[in-house]
Image: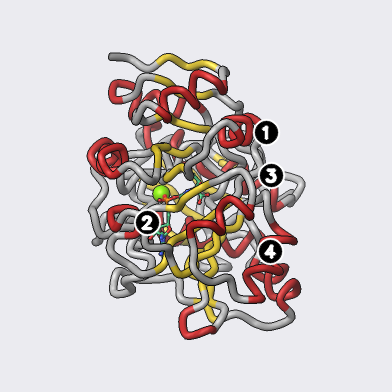
Amino acid sequence: MAATIGSDPHRAAALLTAGKLVALPTETVYGLGANALDPKAVSEIFRVKNRPRFDPLIIHQYTAERLFRHVTEVPVEARLLAEACWPGPLTLVLPKAEHIPDMVTAGLSTVATRVPAHPLCREVLALLDFPVAAPSANPFGFVSPVTARHVADQLGEELEYILDGGSATVGLESTIVGFPAGVPTVFRKGGWPVEQIAEIIGAELEVKTHGSSQPQAPGMLSSHYSPGIPLRLLAHEEKYEPGKDRAVICFGPDFPVELPFYNLSHSGDLKEAARNLFTYLRAIATAGYAEVGIRLVPERGLGRAINDRLRRAAAGGQE
Ligand code: TXA
Ligand code: MG
């Protein structure tokens, strides 16, 4: 079976209702969706992605009101964030309601929730009376897809339908915030800058985003974004001459835009850099370079999440 790539939200909704998997566009990355209340459908997600069962999923719905039916408690900071950031690239981890299958949350007492902003995805969600569990639509350990073609290349044989919503406009996964022991905590840096989240809740957040030793975010293994080639972080002033078999990932007007310079944004725009990042990592993975140097982007706003993914890519294959 090879997936059909199309743009019919009704077909996507009908397949999801029938217990099938559908790849869906979101503003962050493409998701591999299933009815979150149907354990058989959810178990298909884990099989198709080859994802370990200990790595919990995010549930998506059309509005915060619909989503909050599946949690038992919404702290005041979560309510502020939902109002300010949804629909958008933020995921809130909240205490789960009994009826959410354990398979979705990997047995945790909390569930990750998000209202996505992509208009075509929202059309699908509006048609459904259940939440959609959706991890990024890539095999476990690979870079997240930001186009329907990326999904088809890796998972096309396993899917009946890929809903094509064009290139993801954010290009990085959502920022994940939870409230362990009542403390606002960032579990993953992503498409909503942490500085802005702090401003919205009027407090600094704890940041607990790394390592496999952390059961709340087991998906954040350091090798999680490895494209399978030797990537090396360059020291700030380190000289590095790219050539035929050496490329460099860089950012800003000081660097050319022609290959082997993978300039994330020549104009120095972090949003543009976020949109380009995963497409560049995919291109690099198949280009056959012997080595690729990485110059990090400025560590502010979206730059924090971009650097997080670049560091993980450089640490690739070690876990
Ligand atoms: O932007 C996104 O978030 C995309 C789109 C499709 O919505 N989804 C996505 O899902 O990136 P995934 O499965 O690739 O990453 C979900 C992350 C994992 O790192 C997982 O460990 C974490 O969310 N997570 C899920 N449930 C959690 C929970 N209850 N507590 C803490 N982290 C959780
Ligand atoms: Mg993922």
Q: Nearer the viewer, mark 2 or mark 1?
A: 2
Dot 1: what SS?
helix
* Label 4 or label 2, whichever comes before in sequence order: 2
* Label 3 or label 1, whichever comes before in sequence order: 1
Measured as percent of width and height from the top left, residue 72 is found at 49, 68
Q: Nearer the viewer, mark 3 or mark 2?
A: 2
Distance from the alpha carbon under mark 4 to that under mark 2: 37 Å
* Label 3 or label 2, whichever comes before in sequence order: 2
The disc labelled 2 sits on which kind of residue? His
Badge 4 density bin: few <14, some 14–19, many ≥20, Cα 10 Å? some
Measured as percent of width and height from the top left, residue 83 is found at 73, 61
What is the number of the mark on residue 301? 4
Relative depth, front residue between 67 and 6: 67
* Label 1 or label 4, whichever comes before in sequence order: 1
Dot 2: what SS?
loop
Quarter residue 201 falls in? bottom right
Q: Which residue is disc 3 drawn over?
A: 272
The disc labelled 1 sits on which kind of residue? Pro
Tell me which residue sits at (52%, 16%) in the image: 6
Q: Which residue is disc 1 drawn over?
A: 119
Badge 2 density bin: few <14, some 14–19, many ≥20, Cα 10 Å? few
* Label 3 or label 4, whichever comes before in sequence order: 3
Whether tag 3 and tag 2 are in contact, CB under 8 A, the answer is no
Whether tag 3 and tag 4 are in contact, CB under 8 A, the answer is no
